[in-house]
Amino acid sequence: MKQRLGVLGGGYVGLAVAVGFAERGFPVVLVESSEARFQALTEGSFFSSEEDLVKAFEKVKEDGIIHITNRVEDIQEVVYLFVCVGTPEGKEGKTDLRPLWAAVEQSSPYLREDACFIIKSTVPVGTGDQVQAWFNEKGKAVQVLSYPEFLREGKTLEDFRQPSRIVMGGDPHHPRVKELRHLLAEFSLPLLLTSRRDAEMIKYAANAFLATKISFINQMAQLCEVLGSDIQTVAKGIGMDPRIGQAFLAAGIGYGGPCLPKDMASLMEQGRMQDLEMPLLAAVTRINDDQRQWVRSQLRKQWGELKGRFLAVWGVTFKGGSEDVRESQAVSVLEDLLGEGVHIQLYDPFGLEPLKRQWESRGVLESYAGQVQWAKNCWESLERTEGLVILTDWQEFKEVDLQRLKTELPSAFIVDGRNLFYPSMMDQLGFKYVSVGRKV
Ligand code: UDX
């Protein structure tokens, strides 16, 4: 019988961790304290655009290898507790650690003395040591590990099954750590065992580096536009150098989502707390904030005044393949356009309901009602519009029937914030096509 595992938090990370271990035969107790999410997970009404995750989740549920509960008491038999609670951005970039400390306090009475408390959530450097000190003070022999998760939304299970590496911070001589290391050896992946502080820092540094690559390529795209070069060819050419690599060099409207912006803010805050300014990270953030102006400036070049224009907008989620609209750069651009008085027919394969909920909770849904029409599909969004703006790189958009698009969009004017099509092909088809950092 394999070791019993516990997972606290059934969000993106927690669900992938729980399902990923369960499908490898580990009995998993998944604790979800939000009543709405608990019901969705137990009643099967939970939604994800990730098909393989949904399928694998149903299978492990059917096989009875995963037990979903809303009672933290159910972790009593667990030897490894993976803590996957949210660590949102608080005031001035500070990480809000209240959900983590609640997890520590609530699980402590039920944790076995020989258990490992494994922090999967992204937490500021030093947090793992503080949690270890807390358990020590309580006289509990629990071992704390920092085991950050690098998975991407939309590919959470795929990334859990096949991550590029496992980074684990903790005491390498502790028997449970040795056992976990042995257990993870079956994944046949490069494993870096280090201190908790290193592991925590690796997670932030990785996301900051990815954000830097994106802002770098977006800055180069701006230069390509004025100098007449093509950013896609430039990215390909520099990426052929293995020291640089092809990944994360797609120019566009900038990065967003629940991780990159928050982790950049947190890293800068952690530096500031030690009187260390980080001008590189500040510039990366500024370039990203400025990049959202790109769409507006292209529309202004075409029309001058934007007030009263009718546009179709495709995409509101922070990237294709995810239904998440949190910190979405697409939503920021959309709101800028609404602020200019543009009328918008909006389409996204999965993001419209999440956006409605977000706007409702921010109290702005009503105020946008007169300006926004919610389209059922991409074609409906085009009716009587003067142009199309693309803000998210959904596969559905990449595969759109361009001949039909030409017919249904009489102006043939497209501002593509995600560089989905070849400019030469769009030109041949008769579109007036504008994309980021590329020649028309
Ligand atoms: C990120 C990290 O990739 C992952 O390792 C970590 O665990 C969580 O944060 P995620 O937030 O799911 O994952 O999104 P990611 O795929 O990294 O994309 C982030 C943003 O960057 C998106 O808005 C995306 O559209 C944008 N992006 C990405 C670009 O603009 N250009 C690129 O080349 C790549």
Image: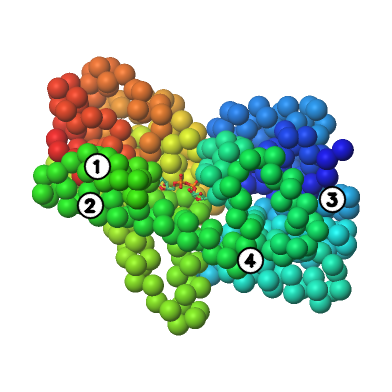
Mark 4 is on which residue type? Answer: Ser
Q: Amino acid at mark 1?
A: Gly
Q: Give the amino acid at mark 2.
A: Met
Q: Residue at x 38, y 36 (%)?
A: 393
Q: Residue 198 location in percent, x, y?
A: 57, 65
Q: Quadrant of the N terminus?
A: top right
Location of mark 4 (residue) = 195
Compared to residue 335, the image places residue 114 above or below, namely below
- Which residue is depicted at the point 38% across and 39% down? 392
- Circles 3 and 2, Cβ within 8 Å, touching? The answer is no
Q: Which residue is mark 3?
A: 78
Earlier sequence position, callout 3 versus callout 1: 3
What secondary structure is marked by label 2? Answer: helix
Q: Earlier in the sequence, mark 3 or mark 2?
A: 3
Q: Which of the two discs, 1 and 2, sits closer to the camera?
A: 1
Q: Position of residue 139 (x, y in %)?
A: 86, 73
Q: Residues within 10 Å of mark 3 (few under 14, many from 20)?
A: many
Q: Quadrant of residue 298?
A: top left
User: On the rendered image, what quadrant is the C terminus found in?
Assistant: top left
Measuring from the top left, give residue 219's x and y in whole percent: 25, 55
Q: Nearer the viewer, residue 107 or 28?
A: 28
Mark closest to the chain's N terminus, 3 or 4: 3
Residue 237 image label:
1
Q: Earlier in the sequence, mark 1 or mark 4?
A: 4
